[in-house]
Amino acid sequence: MLQLPREFNVATYFIDRNVLDGRGKNVAIECGEQKVTYAQLLERVNRVGNALREYGVRPEERVVILLPDRPEFLYSFFGAIKIGSIAVPVNTLLRPSEYEYILRDTRAAVVIVDESLLGQIQNSLFDKRDRLNHILIVGEAPAGYTSFREVLERAAPDLAPAATHKDEAAFWLYSSGSTGSPKGCVHLHHDMVVATERYARGILQINERDRCYSVAKLFFAYGLGNAGYFPLAVGASNILSPARPTPEVIYANIERYRPTLFYSVPTNYAALLAYRREGRDFDLSSIRHAISAGEPLPAALFRRFKDRFDIEILDALGSTEMLHMVISNRPGEVRPGSSGKIIPGYEARIVDENDRDVPPGEIGALLISCDATCAGYWNQHEKTKSSFCGHWFRTGDKYHRDEDGYFWYAGRADDLFKVNGKWLSPTEVEAALISHPSVLEAAVVAGEDGDGLLKPAAYVVLNPECSRSDGLVWELQDWVGEKLGEYKRPRWVEFLSELPKTATGKLQRFKLRERQRPTQAT
């Protein structure tokens, strides 16, 4: 366990410390043409904190942050934390009803929102106006609203940190809500330090010379570390891009800003591989580590990326509850298709339905002990009790561990199903499908045949140059049958233009289960 002082404000660790250690002139953030030094970052964080105090925000009150990836996000996040209030970054891709839920759940004192997103929450804001002290608009503020820029200009540049405790709440992150309402994960002041030391320093060896670019946005737990507090821990540079992360945008940013650490998700790695330009290929030579999380990275994607760019993708497992990675592949020790090994300082168990540890090779429920795990879910007592058991967090994932300590994903607890009396892991069939050269993405769920028996139903997104046909259906079925065995052969295959996913890019299998089963059958 890391030793931190009892009185500890994490904003001083990530913001003030860089200036005190002589890194004030280092570039902390690059965003478009804008460059922000660590000295400027400290001043602007202080100005936000002072402005929030002037508006009556008290310790432990919530400040909702609804911003794309731009410097103002980090000013707001650490400014709120520095005065002892609670920063609540919110996904910019939600529906108005979801914003309504989160604003009601947080009882926010202040909302800091980008001008482009104001319309999404306007009705909810007026409904909650009796609880809100102020609404600050980043960008052009309409009549009746307060400009974030003008507030910063008026606020004082110096700010003493609130005397917070290392185990006090600092920020909330809402889970994706793919299986119900979003859950507010209450994270403490020490959590970001633990995640940084264990993963960013321990696995990636992040240092002051690094330049960090994340496709996952800052409002995600994954992105918040990648291009938020990880670089700030060592005086490195964040590369922020508010634009939608299309392959064209990502490749342009990599060639322009030359990141050394690149973070993305499997769906995006697949999109990058599918995108080409005439003439020379894209230059990714600045990247020393490429990282993947959010969903399992198929071995076929790893190999395609390695063959094309000579870069190993380090697949890893984390969650909003655990803040960042807890299991990861190591540089030079990647086992394609696996999530890697437990990160030193954390512990993992794989257990059966009676919470007894299972032997290597046997599938069970994954439990993690991690000092960065959240304190619980806000306003969800029963869910907190069922998910957090002493030092252990029940991830809801099914895994098996091999003899060498590598963890292999088998699906969510409710994803597995029996075919001919044998357990079938959808991810295994999906990996086999993705290894076919025509397939970009695949998802497998249980479908009922005419006798009411469960069989694999596959939904496939093809590579852009490939065409749908009955012949390809039969080819894919045979491909899986030959690789995995006949009972894992998809009984049905349907081609889709895209798979249903959450705003975080996670597959929504329940939507596929709700579909009428694919019509192609053998």
Image (tube, rainbow, N blue to C red):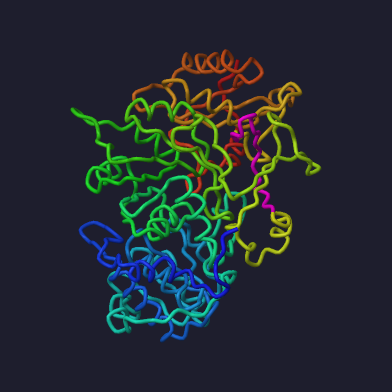
Number of marks present in the image shown:
0
Residue 477 drawn above or below residue 101:
above
Name the residue: 30% across, 44% down.
Answer: 250
Name the residue: 73% across, 57% down.
Answer: 390
Magenta residue span: 392-407
Q: Nearer the viewer, residue 79 or 17?
A: 17
- Indicate the position of residue 504 as horizontal and vertical percent values: 48, 49
- Indicate the position of residue 399 as horizontal and vertical percent values: 64, 36
| Left or right, residue 103 beside residue 208 | right
Residue lying farthest left? Answer: 279
Q: Quadrant of residue 515?
A: top right
Name the residue: 54% across, 55% down.
Answer: 323
| Left or right, residue 5 beside residue 463 | right
Rendered-image quadrant of the C terminus: top right
On the question of residue 241 being in view, the answer is no
On the question of residue 186 being in view, the answer is yes
Residue 232 drawn above or below residue 362:
below
User: Magenta: predominant secondary structure element?
Assistant: strand
| Left or right, residue 398 beside residue 2 | right
- Indicate the position of residue 209 as horizontal and vertical percent values: 30, 52
Name the residue: 44% across, 18% down.
Answer: 469
Residue 405 magenta-highlighted: yes
Q: Quadrant of residue 149?
A: bottom left
Residue lying farthest right? Answer: 354
- Indicate the position of residue 22 as horizontal and vertical percent values: 30, 67
Q: Nearer the viewer, residue 337 or 433?
A: 337
Rendered-image quadrant of the N terminus: bottom right
Residue 408 magenta-highlighted: no
